[in-house]
Amino acid sequence: MFDQRFKETDPEFAQKFEAFALTEVVQEPGQELDAPTRYLAILSVLTGSQGIDAFREILPDALKNGLTPVMVKEMVYQAVAYLGYGRVCPFLKAVNDCLEDLGIALPLEGQATTTMEDRLEKGAQAQVDIFGDGMKDFWKGGHMNRWLAANCFGDYYTRKGLDLKQREMITFCFLLAQGGCEPQLTSHAAGNMQIGNDENFLLRVVSQCVPYIGYPRSLNAIQCVKNAAGKTN
């Protein structure tokens, strides 16, 4: 789960971090997540916060605890829409390296469900499914809105491998981890709640990610969740 060399070079740190991250946080009453969901959230926040070394350390454990290669790849692909290719490229390479080391042939089976002809229509529908009917004509508000519908949602959210609830959760994680995106984080917290990832679930996601992103961004995320809950309840 983390670099075992720290037990030799930094034994006091290693003992404290391991006890907190791998036992106390994971077992905190009322804050638990099933292993696949917890690992998906952790890999997502590490991507969002650019924690490439920790990502490489944790990825093999994630693949042993319920995440499939397709799920991991889909998380990384979707991250491009929220972090940009420049920040995601090292993570895609890390996943490919890990899968090749495990003897998994690449490329994986394709997961696309849209074409260049219908990606806008299906992406706009995905926005409606998450955020409500008010998003039906959002794409008509200029090229950036059209790109969001066609590219972010049409190219990524419509893919197989992760369901809509999982995709909204990882978006929430990308946003909370990179910081400075509180308006979007609040909006996506509300979107999560509207499709069944309720306030309690999102707070558990934040709790499980504290060791990997620290307290400031975690506390900001908790406030955004509470703000979103106040608007949707």
Image (tube, rainbow, N blue to C red):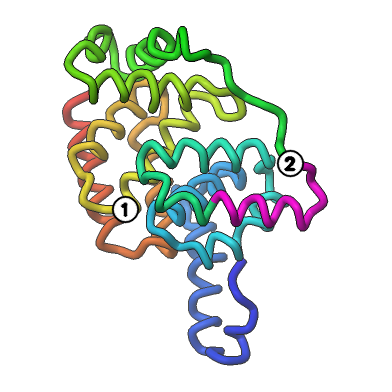
Name the residue that disc number 2 marks.
106
User: Residue 164 colored magenta?
Assistant: no
Q: Which of pointers 2 and 1 lies earlier in the amino acid sequence? A: 2
Counting from the top left corner in percent of width and height, residue 165 is at 47, 27
Quadrant of the rendered image containing residue 94: bottom right
Residue 178: assigned label: 1
124 or 5, which is in the foreground?
124
Q: Amino acid at mark 2?
A: Leu
86 or 52, which is in the foreground?
86
Q: Is residue 140 above or below residue 66?
A: above
Counting from the top left corner in percent of width and height, residue 81 is at 38, 36
Magenta region:
92-105
What secondary structure is marked by label 1?
helix
Residues packed near mark 1 inside 10 Å, few (<14), some (14 to 19) or many (20 plus):
some
Give the residue displayed 54% in from the left and 81% down from the top.
14
Quarter occupied by the N terminus = bottom right
Counting from the top left corner in percent of width and height, residue 61 is at 67, 57
147 or 23, which is in the foreground?
147
Residues packed near mark 2 inside 10 Å, few (<14), some (14 to 19) or many (20 plus):
few
Q: Is residue 9 left or right of residue 20?
A: right
> Would residue 208 be seen by someone viewing this image from the given angle?
no
Q: Amino acid at mark 1?
A: Gln
Give the residue displayed 51% in from the left and 38% down from the top.
77
